Image (spheres, rainbow, N blue to C red):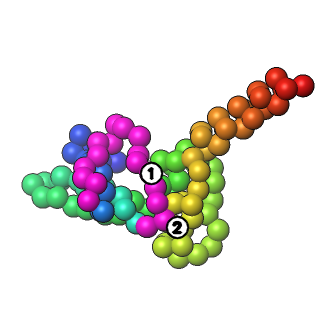
């Protein structure tokens, strides 16, 4: 595991840098986020992988269906964060109970 103080996220489409201690910006159907690591005097960059994007969305237990990496990133971008979905359904249930 990398020292997180030496890492930042970079948004490939001109949105700039992002610290690892804040929520990830919107995940789109395109590959946007790269992890930039400063190690031994040089910077190394790699794109976030689909399982990492899923974890950032709060979907730790979800498994993407078969497909290449691009297809899986696209599915992540079309997804809704688990925590958001839970809150939406809790509100729907609360409203429906209130109307009864």
Residue designated by label 1:
26
Where residue 87 sits: x, y (%)? Answer: 65, 35
Where residue 54 sits: x, y (%)? Answer: 53, 53
Q: Which mark is residue 74?
A: 2
Q: Which residues are magenta?
A: 14-30
Residue at horizontal 28 percent and vertical 54 percent from the top = 15
Quadrant in the picture for residue 83: top right
Residue farthest right in this picture: 100
Residue farthest bottom in this picture: 68
Residue 7 seen in render? yes
Asked if residue 21 is positioned above or below residue 45 in the image, the reply reads above
Residue at horizontal 33 percent and vertical 42 percent from the top = 20
Residue at horizontal 46 percent and vertical 55 percent from the top = 27
Residue 50 seen in render? no
**Please, what secondary structure does the residue beneath circle 1 have?**
loop
- Please tell me whether the stretch drawn in magenta is mainly helix, strand or loop: loop
Asked if residue 70 is positioned above or below residue 58 in the image, the reply reads below
Real-space Cα separation, disc 1 to disc 2, in angstroms: 13 Å
| Left or right: residue 5 compared with residue 1 | left
Residue at horizontal 23 percent and vertical 40 percent from the top = 5
| Left or right: residue 45 compared with residue 23 | left
């Amino acid at each position: 595991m990398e020292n997180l103080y030496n890492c930042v996220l970079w948004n490939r489409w001109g949105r700039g840098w992002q610290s690892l201690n804040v929520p990830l910006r919107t995940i789109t159907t395109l590959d946007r986020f790269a992890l930039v690591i400063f190690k031994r005097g040089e910077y190394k960059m790699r794109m976030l992988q689909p399982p990492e994007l899923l974890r950032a969305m709060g979907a730790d237990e979800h498994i993407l269906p078969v497909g290449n990496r691009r297809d899986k990133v696209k599915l992540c971008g079309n997804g809704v964060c688990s925590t958001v979905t839970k809150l939406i359904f809790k509100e729907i249930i609360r409203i429906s109970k209130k109307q009864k």
